[in-house]
């Protein structure tokens, strides 16, 4: 069982807004930055959000991140079919002295 | 262009050893922490280990402590993962990943090298 809890699946229709949650604790999300990665089928993961809510260059502003207390969320607006992928949150855990990944959320665009 | 190219994966028997390598280019390797992240077939991502720029700090996930050793050679822009006493549950695609250095850890990933532990 992952230290960070994500819903195993999420879905939406084209153009919709979907959110993916990531729940942690006081030793990880509560005190450190949250990062989000996206993994398209058969490819290596790619950084989507860093430092809770910052987008690397090239990532569209349809993607946004937020954090409150020991939880974080990734929001995707204007959903596109190519957004079908697995999404992972990742945080440094001070108690474990380790990076911890969420279990991943498989996003389906209906 | 940043490139991370892993090598060294393969089929190994339980209890065996394997050494993974990652050749880095396109950035100043000695300025970055580096990580190994793995993904078992059909499963999620699991961070394995990371190493500070000068090798003075190293961290591991509990499941590999005492069996895996991460190291680096900044003169060769290379990252390594020595794996011993391999178990079936170590079977995974192992990614070399750029870690801390510019405020954006996990910003570059290699394509991975597959390790299969089976008799």
Image (cartoon, grey):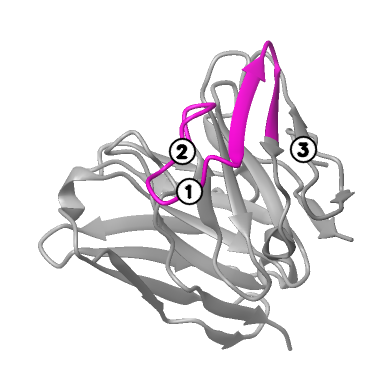
Q: What secondary structure is found at the residue carrying circle 3?
A: strand
Residue B67's quadrant in the figure? bottom right
Q: Numbered disc 2: what chain?
A: A
Magenta-highlighted residues? A50-74
Residue at the (63%, 52%) spot, across then down: B46
Point out residue A46 in the picture as x, y percentages from the top left corner: 51, 56
Q: Reply above or below: A16 against B3.
A: above
- Dot label at residue A59: 1
Magenta span main SS: loop
Residue at the (77%, 49%) spot, across then down: A15
Point out residue A43 in the picture as x, y percentages from the top left corner: 58, 72
Point out residue A29 in the picture as x, y percentages from the top left corner: 62, 21
Residue at the (32%, 36%) spot, across then down: B57
Q: Reply above or below: B70 against A16.
A: below
Residue A2's quadrant in the figure? top right
Can you identify the residue that label 2 sits on? A55
Horizontally, residue A31 falls left or right of residue A58, namely right
Looking at the image, do the residues carrying marks 1 and 2 touch, with CB atoms under 8 Å apart?
Answer: yes
* Closer-to-camera residue (A92/B13): A92
């Amino acid at each position: 069982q992952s230290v960070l809890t994500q819903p195993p699946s999420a879905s939406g229709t084209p153009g919709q807004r979907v959110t993916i949650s990531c729940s942690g604790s006081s030793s990880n999300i509560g005190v450190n930055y949250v990062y989000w990665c996206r993994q398209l089928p058969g490819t290596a993961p790619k950084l989507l959000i860093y430092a809770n809510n910052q987008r690397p260059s090239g990532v569209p502003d349809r993607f946004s991140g937020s954090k409150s207390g020991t939880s974080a969320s990734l929001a995707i607006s204007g959903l596109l079919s190519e957004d079908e992928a697995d999404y992972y949150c990742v945080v440094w855990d001070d108690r474990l002295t380790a990076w911890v990944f969420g279990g991943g959320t498989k996003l389906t665009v209906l | 262009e940043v490139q991370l190219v892993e090598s060294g994966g393969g089929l190994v028997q339980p209890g065996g050893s394997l050494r993974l390598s990652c050749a880095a280019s396109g950035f100043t390797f000695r300025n970055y922490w580096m990580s190994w992240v793995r993904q078992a077939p059909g499963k999620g991502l699991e961070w394995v280990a990371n190493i500070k720029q000068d090798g003075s700090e190293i961290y591991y996930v509990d499941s590999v402590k005492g069996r895996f050793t991460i190291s680096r050679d900044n003169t060769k822009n290379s990252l390594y993962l020595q794996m011993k006493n391999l178990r079936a549950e170590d079977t995974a695609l192992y990614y070399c990943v750029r870690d801390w250095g510019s405020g954006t850890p996990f910003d570059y990933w290699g394509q991975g090298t597959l390790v299969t532990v089976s008799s």
